[in-house]
Amino acid sequence: MDDTVREHELIIADALSRHRSGDLVTAGSAYDEVLARDPNHAEALHLKGVLLAQQGHTDTALNFLDRAVHVAPLDPRILGNRAKIRLDSGDVAGSLDDYRTALRRSPNDPDMHFNAAGAFAADGKLEDAVGLLERACKIAPAHARALANLGNMYRQLGRLADSMDVLERAVVQAPDDPQVRHSLGATLSDSRNYEAAAVQFRKALAGDRGFVRAGVQLFYANLHSCDWQDRDKLISNFRRMIEGAGTPIAELSPLIALFLPVEQASLNRVSEARARSLESAVGISSVNREDARLHIGYLSADLGGHPVGHLMVDIFKQHDRSAFQVSAIALAPPDGSEVQKAIFDAADDVLDVSGLSAGDAAERIRGAKVDILIDLGGFTRGARPEILAARAAPLQLGWLGYCGSAGGLNDAIIADQTVLPPQDVKHFAESVSYLPGSFMPLNNHVTPAENRDAREDHGLPGDCFVFCAFNAPTKIDPETFASWMEILAQVEGSVLWLREHTDASTRNLRVAADEHAIDPARLIFAPLLAGMESHMARHRHADLFLDTFVYGAHSTAADAIAMGLPVLTLAGPAMPSRVGASLCHAYGLPELIADTPQSYIETAVAHARDPGLLRARRDALAAQLPVMRDGAGFVRKLQAAYISLWDANMANQLTPGQAIDIASDINIGDEL
């Protein structure tokens, strides 16, 4: 080895030490010094490229790494680092090519397998990613990060037992690692062991007090347990994050934010932050119509045995095929349900994009020449907002499944003036299209069972007033529950019929009732029934449906109204709390829309004490029955909205934060 080579090695070694300690300026100067003497020094090119990437100069960094690869084409370290930077820059295909070559050159490097798995996962190749992580864990059984990521992958694939096994091993290897604790908590949560999940999330937060996702998941796990011990502190922290609008806001889940008692503008800021984090340069969908009909595609993971699926069956059936081609675009594998079969049979075609990456799914939708993509999921579980960010269609609309803004990923949201009051339109990053009546259809697919059962068959007293609250217990907040207990205190002998969820939620709600001096036996829990027909039928045994305050009943309220059960609701400050009001306004129950918790309590008590008052509400609902069952009429107004929005989009008249009305010259049939 000559003196020049040795000197270069010494300079590189010292520079690398400074680089690792964070002194990027001195390290960069040293790399430049070596390159001035030897422009083809592979290691200097390599490390300079890594440093530039750390400083945010991605294009220049890749230029240096390309030169390094040219000089040393088989060095797995250089290929691996270029792969990481390519992935960060959005070049997934280039990243995968580099990792494949690096793995051939370094087949026993667990870190290379670990890093490559991330690229394959980003490309939607989860099974390949799992194989790489399994190999990493076999090479290095104590590799905590590989174990944790393998557990996360297993969870995404529904392999919860396998996920639990490897994550428990990861915790043994790294008991103080917040990320590992968070991963185990997520799997416990998906396994419906919410109390154990909360323990893990608290441990993650103890190790990193700024771990936003752990705080969000703790809040969500507690919702499932009706455990309110952390609630006030977490909500206070989330409010500060939203008001600060800094980087951490993007880590808040827009879905979980719907459970926060905040204004609509705050919810929209969370959605917009998440949408910005998903911005993509993948393809721009252009208009390429070959058919006089508009091709609409409903994008959802819930086109099956899910409340959205039940509401959508009639929509697919009723569309006017002379004016519309209708596609179902599935984000989840087939669930084998009767509901899904009915939807797929009614659709003109079905596109299953559940196994595709976001970019490939968007390309598939473009290839199908979909004109209007109706997003039924937003930021809900199973939704793929990355597809919306990739601009899969010339016009993208949000409707039904997610009650809020998509943060600008869609061009417009379809709502009504009750669920989204005109004064809130300015807060939206999309246009707002108002339907007449309610934006929410009713379930015209399920025929209630003709049960001749009695209240006693459901564990209810035979002769008392039955308040019903079939919302998911995740939606029960302390203020709502306190109001319910006050209602029970004032209506002697009445009971509250709740939906059974978890052992923890049942136990905690009974404890809370006792704390309000209400006999826990007056809370009666309705078990999950196998058929929707039986669930709909049991509404006949309730007298009045009580809505929740922050995140109210949506399809649950629609089901109650469809069964002639009056719904009492409190119209809150944001869309999640106003769906009940939308339905009550549309179906003749304006007197049951309260504006304060006290008026809510007074209205409930008054209807329980005055049978004539309650009968008047039931009669009002009965009078609306023909309108409720007019599924064709609802679809006509929906189609009118699609046509108006398409025309406005073609004329460049869709403006974020502004409302657009359905064109008056379009025959929308009878308004609902």
Image (cartoon, helix red, strand yellow):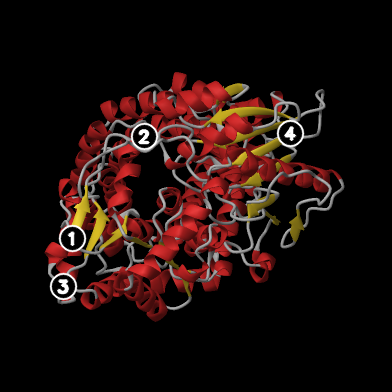
Which corner quadrant of the image does residue 269 belong to? bottom right
Pick whichever, 187 or 594, lies toward us: 594
Pick whichever, 416 or 450, lies toward us: 450
Tell me how far mark 2 sits from mark 4, CA to CA.
Answer: 34 Å
> Which sits earlier in the primary sequence, circle 2 or circle 4?
2
Residue at numbered disc 2: 153
Tell me how far mark 1 sits from mark 3, CA to CA.
Answer: 19 Å
> Which sits earlier in the primary sequence, circle 2 or circle 3?
2
Residue type (three-letter) at the residue carrying disc 2: Met
> Which sits earlier in the primary sequence, circle 1 or circle 3?
1
Residue at numbered disc 4: 371
- On residue 449, the disc is none
- Residue 661 lies, in percent from the top left, at 76, 56
Tell me how far mark 1 sits from mark 2, CA to CA.
Answer: 52 Å
1 vs 3, front mark = 1
Residue 42 visible in the current orientation: no
4 vs 1, front mark = 1
Residue at 41 percent of width and 25 percent of height: 338
The crowd level at tag 1 (other Cα within 10 Å; few <14, some 14-19, many 20+) is few
Residue type (three-letter) at the residue carrying disc 1: Asp
Residue at numbered disc 1: 463
> Which sits earlier in the primary sequence, circle 4 or circle 1?
4
In the current view of this chain or complex, which residue is farthest to the top?
Answer: 104
Residue at numbered disc 3: 518
